[in-house]
Image (tube, helix red, strand yellow):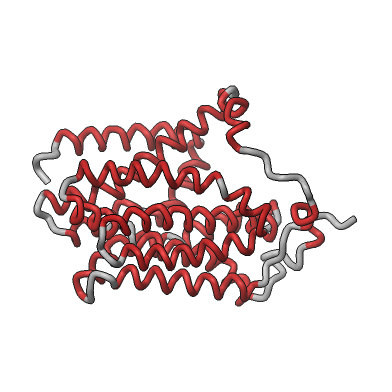
Amino acid sequence: MLTARSALPATIATLPRHQALAFLSLFFVPGVAQAILLTVVPLEALSLLGTARSATLLYVVTGLVAVFGRFSIPYLVALVRRRFVFTIGAIALATSSSLLALNELRLLAVGLVLSTFAFACIEITSQLYLLDHVPRHSLKHFEPIRIFASAGPWTVGPWLGVYLQRAIGFAAPFAVTACAGAILLVLFWSLRLGENATLATTRRPPSNPVLYLRRFFAQPRLRLAWTLAASRSSWWSMFYVYAPIFAVTAGLGAEIGGVVTSIGTRIWLVPVWGWVGRCFGLRRLLHAGYAVAGFLSILAALSFGTP
């Protein structure tokens, strides 16, 4: 019987150069689509709702709805296979961008839920294909390349979205995201990625992830890992939403908000933090990172009245 690994057509190391770059683009192009909307969507919510509090409620409600969509992805993978879940994600990305471009409150809410679901479909299936096509011993070399390739979009995108709206028109960044979804779809199908042989032949329905929560949180190390990841994700969500909103409400302007968000992302420093972690240890790096982030957040709150 063929194993899942041997049944695959190729790994990233054996693909021709142009196909390897196309595989890397499965992570780069979604970064472009996501980063360019990072600033303009919170500002659209502020414009339509009028206050930061109302924008917060919108993000909380749409985020809770999107959680259920994320939990449905394992069932979708079992039902229609990974390649079609990725396809659904790319199509949903283009569709959500069109809804967001219409600048209407109800469509904004639907577009936010759909875009979150789209990025979840793309992210989860891309990671599955990554595990299938990149040998385990090569992950340590591929991951820094993948993350560093995302540095460009995440550094320029938040400012570029606002700039395109000012220089071209309101719908410009959403048009870029819709085009990114179409490009992503073409790149994905050009790679002709196969299904994992073991998963493709199994008849057992996917397990309900909710059933594993009790077992997960019963383990101290997993609780700690979840707490660190959740707090980090929450902080970045707060920064991405409220940095541009604060810049506008304080009179600095939307473009300054985009610049602040772009500078704050700093993914291009990942190699530096990797070197620091190797030299001084990951525990010390985490301690210092969370402490500095907390201190700067408190300092920003204390100086809230002096933008």
Measured along the vertical axis of the image, is residue 11 above or below residue 182?
A: above
Name the residue furthest front.
106
Residue at image point 32% right, 62% down: 100
The quadrant the N terminus occupies is: bottom right
Q: Position of residue 191 (x, y in %)?
A: 64, 72
Front residue of 13/128: it is 128
Q: Position of residue 102 (x, y in %)?
A: 28, 66
Q: Position of residue 268 (x, y in %)?
A: 40, 57
In the picture, measured across the screen, residue 272 lies left or right of residue 61, that is right
Front residue of 75/245: it is 75
Instruction: Please say whether residue 66 is visible from this viewpoint.
Output: yes
Name the residue furthest right.
1
Q: Position of residue 103 (x, y in %)?
A: 25, 63
Measured along the vertical axis of the image, is residue 159 above or below residue 66?
A: below
Instruction: Please say whether residue 144 is visible from this viewpoint.
Output: no
User: For residue 262, which quarter of the picture?
Assistant: bottom left
